Structure formats: structure tokens, C-alpha cells
Image: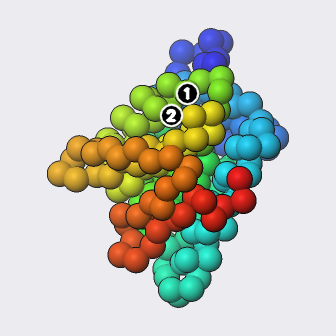
Amino acid sequence: MALAQKTTYTEEDYYNLPEDVRAELIDGQIYYQAAPGLIHQTISGELHTAINNYIKSKKGSCRVFAAPFAVKLFDSGSTIVEPDISVICDRGKLTDRGCFGAPDWIIEIISPGNPEHDLIYKLGLYARAGVREYWIADPRSETILVYYLEQKNFEIRAYSFESKIKVNIFDDFEIDFRELDL
């Protein structure tokens, strides 16, 4: 839910929030986020581990971060999101405050309270910012929607939690959801 006291919030307002507050700044509005539940955290932890293990095994330059991790998508500073998982391959985008610019790959895990936030609104933000790959995991339906950027438009593929999914930003990486401890 957006705050109503102030018309437009800034990057400074976002970074001055208390450390224990989970929130995102989207187009100048602050949206508070509830603490994630058990299945959300389980999926996030399993995916983070699989991605991190792959990157380490390849001695890759990419880094993987789990929320809370600030991602400032645009120069204006009016949009700072906290994706559930962010993979950044250009280490020049990393600062002491998080990531400045589009991550290469973002994974969001849908929370029951506001699925359209990830399914519609963030999809548009990530497309405009130039995110190369965007996954949306839905624990309730046990589905994963995979969007990849091709010629400035996201294309979509749908999978189940029984699928092996090719990660498009890497040549030889697949995540087999059947092997995750969900």
C-alpha cells in the first residue's frame, strides 16, 4: 500500500527509512512490504543457493543477491525496488547501497496479498529498465513464468514446479525444480 502523506517520495526518503522496514520506492511512491512467509523464504533460499553454486562452479563474475537488496533502476532515483533475487553480471553496477541499473536477471516470488504488483507493474518496470530475464514464481499455483528480453519486448514461457528451466542469461545452466527442497 502506498503512503498518502506526501505526494512524491525521493531516493533520500527511501534510504532514510528504518532498517527493519521493507519497502520499495516506485515512481515516487513508497510501498511497504510484509515479511515473507515460510514457502516464500524456502523458494528464495533454494534458488539463491542453486544460482550461487552455479556461478561459483564456473568462476563467473556475476553476483547473486537475495532481498532485501536495493536496486535503483533509473537515474532519476524515483524507483528503487527490492527483488527477491537479483543477479548482476556487471560488477560496476554494484555500490555500497545495492545495484545501480538493471540486473541481468530478477526473480520475484509472488506474495498472496498483491500478485498484480509482480505480474503486471514490475514486469513493465523491468522491461523499461532493460532487465534481460525475469522469473515470477507463484507458490500457490506452483508455476514459474519466465520472461526474456528480445528486441525490447519480453517474451514469456510458463513452467511448473516439476520443470527443468533453462536460464537464458547463461549458456549451460538449468534449474530443475524437482531437485529443490520445496
Question: Please, is residue 82 above or below residue 172 in the view?
Answer: above
In the foreground, 120 or 130: 120
Label 2 amino acid? Asp
Find residue 27 and report its horizontal and vertical position in percent: 46, 29
Q: Residue at 45% of width from left, 60% of height from top? A: 165
| Left or right position of 121 against 39 | left
Q: Are marks 2 and 1 in contact (CB under 8 Å)?
A: yes
| Left or right position of 47 against 75 | right
Residue 38 falls in image quadrant: top right
Question: Please, is residue 117 above or below residue 129 in the view?
Answer: above
Give the residue furthest to the left. 151
Q: Residue at 65% of width from left, 12% of height from top? A: 5
In the foreground, 170 or 64: 170
Q: Residue at 58% of width from left, 54% of height from top? A: 85
Residue 7: in sight, yes or no?
Answer: yes
Residue 57 falls in image quadrant: bottom right
Judged from the image, the secondary structure of the residue bearing numbered disc 1 is: helix
Query: Disc 1 designates what residue?
Result: 115
In the foreground, 124 or 49: 49
Q: Tag 2: Cα neighbours inside 10 Å, few (<14), some, or many (≥20)?
A: many
Q: Residue at 63% of width from left, 33% of height from top? A: 140
Judged from the image, the secondary structure of the residue bearing numbered disc 2 is: helix
Query: Disc 2 designates what residue?
Result: 118
Label 1 amino acid? Pro
